[in-house]
Image: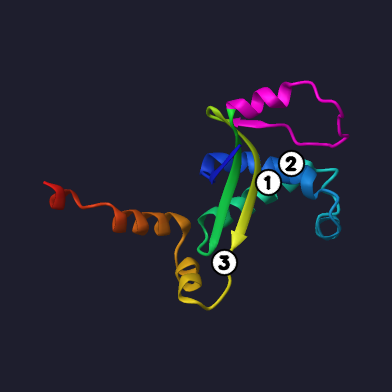
Amino acid sequence: MRIRRATPGDLSTTATFSVPAFMHDELYRFTYPFAARYPEDFRQYYLRKHKQRNAQAGYVFWVAILDPADEAEEHAPKQEAAQVDHAPLKSVGDEKVVGYAIWHRYGQSEQAKSWQSQTWAECRKSRWEERSPRRSETD
């Protein structure tokens, strides 16, 4: 298994994972009392939230990807089967997204402020430009 930054193509899958994960959470039962009756509406809420978080400054959105070796292990017979209600694995291209995490950076340090002022794409771009020589410098 490996972890990588979420892409817009992953967000539908992460929203789908969120429905069974948070369906019975006390807070969401209070704020979305009809989530069990209308799970697609609950999923659309998470899709909007994940799109916002993926683009919003200060947030970092990661997904866990299943490697081919992990898939072989997943299908191997297990000695003890746990009774857990898992969301189905979703393929994104040739990858299977199996989980996600979202972090929000708080704090007053210079590093925290740099995270809070840029989206992840802007941070990646500026860091890439710092490390990569300009074409005119290499010619």
Residue 87 location, x and y as percent?
75, 36
Q: Which mark is residue 44?
A: 1
In the rendered structure, which disc, 2 or 3, sits on the residue that comes first in sequence?
2
- On the picture, is 61 further left or further right than 82? left
2 or 3: mark nearer the eye: 3
Q: Are marks 2 and 1 in contact (CB under 8 Å)?
A: yes
- Residue that carries the numbered disc 3 in the rendered image: 105
Q: Bin the neighbour count of mark 3 within 10 Å (Cα to Cα): few under 14, some 14-19, many 20 and up.
A: some
x and y, in percent, of residue 27 in the image = 82, 60
Q: Residue at x 52, y 60 (%)?
A: 56
Q: Which residue is mark 2?
A: 40
Disc 1 residue type (three-letter): Gln
Of the image marks 1 and 3, the number of the one nearer the N terminus: 1
Q: Which residues are magenta?
A: 68-91
x, y (%) of residue 92?
56, 32
* Residue at 85% from the left image edge and 43% from the top image edge: 37
Q: Confirm or deny contact between disc 2 and disc 3 (CB under 8 A).
A: no
Is 33 left or right of 74, judged from the image as shown? right
- Mark 2 to mark 3: distance in Å? 30 Å
